[in-house]
């Protein structure tokens, strides 16, 4: 349940950032693609669509994602996406085959770079 909520919240945060954050919009550039995050058993999946410098998300798998990140289970996906050192968690997961990447690995790196724009802004 936590993983499903996290994916939904990630979609909300990215959609808002794509509307309000010029730096985030610049990262989206002229990309026109979809990607998905899911569990390897297929029970939980959410896909994200990038088009016209906006991101939308919907539950379920994408028909033809540019890349997909599959986590061995929901608990592992939640732990990885909320880890303090996300890059280390991802690298270990990929090495241990607990995370499977399908599609373009360069886009996975691009996606990881988007996360720095999703942190709450500190008030002055």
Image: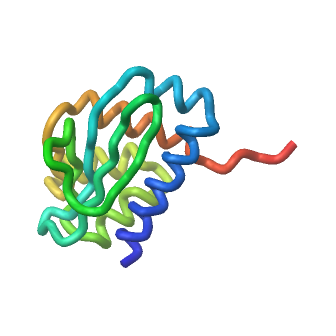
Q: Residue at x 21, y 46 (%)?
A: 68
Q: Residue at x 14, y 53 (%)?
A: 97
Residue situated furthest bottom in the rendering: 1
Q: How is the image coloured?
A: rainbow
Taking the image as shown, residue 37 lies to the left or right of residue 100, namely right
User: Looking at the image, which is closer to me, 3 or 48?
Assistant: 48
Instruction: Where is residue 82? Give x, y as percent.
Output: 45, 60
Image position of 32 with respect to 93: above or below: above
Image position of 34 with respect to 72: above or below: above
User: Looking at the image, which is closer to me, 85 or 51?
Assistant: 51
Instruction: Where is residue 56? Give x, y as percent.
Output: 41, 47
User: Looking at the image, which is closer to me, 124 or 34?
Assistant: 34
Q: Residue at x 61, y 28 (%)?
A: 22
| Res 67 → quadrant | top left
Instruction: Where is residue 45? Give x, y as percent.
Output: 24, 62
Taking the image as shown, residue 70 lies to the left or right of residue 124, namely left
Instruction: Where is residue 41? Give x, y as percent.
Output: 12, 68
| Res 107 → quadrant | top left
Image position of 5 with respect to 49: above or below: below
Image position of 110 with respect to 123: above or below: above
Q: Quadrant of the C terminus?
A: top right
Taking the image as shown, residue 30 lies to the left or right of residue 20, namely left
Q: Residue at x 58, y 39 (%)?
A: 19
Q: Quadrant of the N terminus?
A: bottom left
């Amino acid at each position: 349940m936590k993983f499903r909520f996290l994916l939904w919240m990630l979609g909300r945060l990215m959609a808002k950032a794509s509307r309000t954050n010029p730096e985030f919009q610049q990262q989206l550039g002229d990309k026109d693609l979809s990607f998905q995050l899911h569990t390897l058993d297929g029970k939980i999946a959410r896909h994200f669509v990038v088009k016209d410098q906006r991101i939308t998300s919907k539950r379920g798998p994408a028909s033809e994602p540019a890349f997909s990140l599959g986590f061995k289970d929901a608990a592992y996906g939640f732990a990885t996406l909320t880890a303090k050192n996300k890059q280390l968690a991802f690298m270990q997961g990929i090495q241990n085959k607990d995370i499977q990447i399908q599609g373009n690995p360069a886009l996975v790196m691009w996606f990881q770079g988007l996360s720095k724009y999703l942190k709450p802004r500190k008030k002055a």
